[in-house]
Amino acid sequence: MKAVARTMYGSADVLEFVDVNKPAVADDEILIRVHAAGAGPEVWHLMTGLPYLVRVMGFGLRKPKNPILGTDVAGVVEAVGREVTELRIGDAVFGTCAGSFAEYACARADHVAPKPTNLTLEQAAVLPTSGCTALQGLHDVGRIEAGQSVLIIGASGGVGTFAVQLAKAFGAEVTGVCRTDAIDLVRSLGADHVIDYTSDDFADGARRYDLILDTAGRRSLTHLRRALSPHGTLVIVGGEGGGKWTGGFERQIVRATLLSVVVPQRLRPLTSTARRKDLLVLKEFAEDGKLTPVVSKSCPLREAAKVLSDADEGHGRGKVVITI
């Protein structure tokens, strides 16, 4: 089968379009005939091995453990392991796996769910990682409630576009922060207010928010707290910015956690996982018309390196989909 793989960490130049063996299915897995795979900053981190903390987390210290890139996946079940009872051959599914940039990929059955009936496989492929991150950040960690004022920083990005829609679905008053050229997009997603960060400061003291979801990862805790209500909650997503060793994770995990001990505001880091139960929640929101993935661009598998070369810039709209 064809796949996009690499034998070392690095820029998109290390990627190769190669022939590899079709993966064997474990007892608790399914084999997916991949139709589409999502691509975003999370893939860039695994491609480059940056920050180095990513390598320590089990992806390989000196070189990648799994040469095939890609996490988000959507496709059709080709085979099922002996312990799998929820899915059948021929089912259209979406979820996460190791190595989705390939014609076939194996995924744990509890990491996938039936595809939303009203979404294409391409749309479903960009939903798992970013959608689950937005859902867990707002609901599980942020404890969002109807009527709250919610600020989404990075509202036009992969996580942000889902977060705006989900926050509205939960009944919140939503303000999105984005660049000038993304204002119309964020408004179209349902945001009640939009702040252009190139000309306005959301932390200027004019308003404070009950819940802030920071998906951009490059602002100081001091700056973010100025926009947070005295007993509000700040949820920090991902580890963008920072140095090569820990990236933004030092701010997210160490500083925010320690500061929470001495201030009345809740400062919480988020490390998300695409769980089946959350995928089913996203499926329901999508089928109810409350959640629509934003696909910024699409390209065939052999051209994946082109769209990954700038995945770390952090100014994208929605997510990129790789078609197989």
Image (cartoon, rainbow, N blue to C red):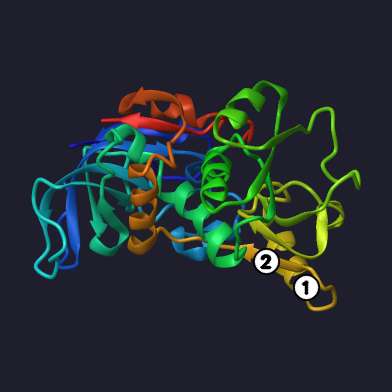
The residue most toward the right is: 205
Q: Position of residue 24 (x, y in %)?
A: 15, 56
| Residue 299 horizontal side relative to residue 60, left or right | left
Given residues 95 and 152, the one toward you in this image is 152
Under mark 1, the amino acid is Ser
The N terminus is located in which quarter? top left
In the drawing, does residue 191 fall left or right of residue 228? left
In-image side of 117 versus 151 (left or right): left
Residue 193 seen anywhere in this rendered image of the structure: yes
| Count of numbered circles on the image | 2
Q: Residue at image x 60%, y 34%?
A: 156
Residue placed most toward the observer, 140 or 248? 140
Name the residue: 41% across, 34% down: 15
Label 2: few (<14), some (14–19) or many (≥20) C-alpha neighbours in 10 Å: many
Amino acid type, callout 2: Arg
In the image, which disc is placed on residue 216? none
**Residue 75's x, y, as percent?**
22, 41
Judge whether 294 appears above or below 58 on screen.
above
Which structural element holds mark 2?
strand
Tags 1 and 2 touching, CB below 8 Å: yes
Q: Secondary structure at mark 1?
A: helix
Compared with 279, 174 (above or below) is above
| Residue at numbered disc 2 | 268
Which residue in the protein does label 1 denote?
260
Pick out the residue farthest to the bottom.
261
Q: Left or right: where does residue 140 sit relative to residue 111?
A: right
Query: Residue at horizontal 66%, vertical 47%?
Result: 173
Q: Residue 126: x and y, percent?
A: 40, 40
Which one is nearer the viewer's eye here, 310 or 15?
310
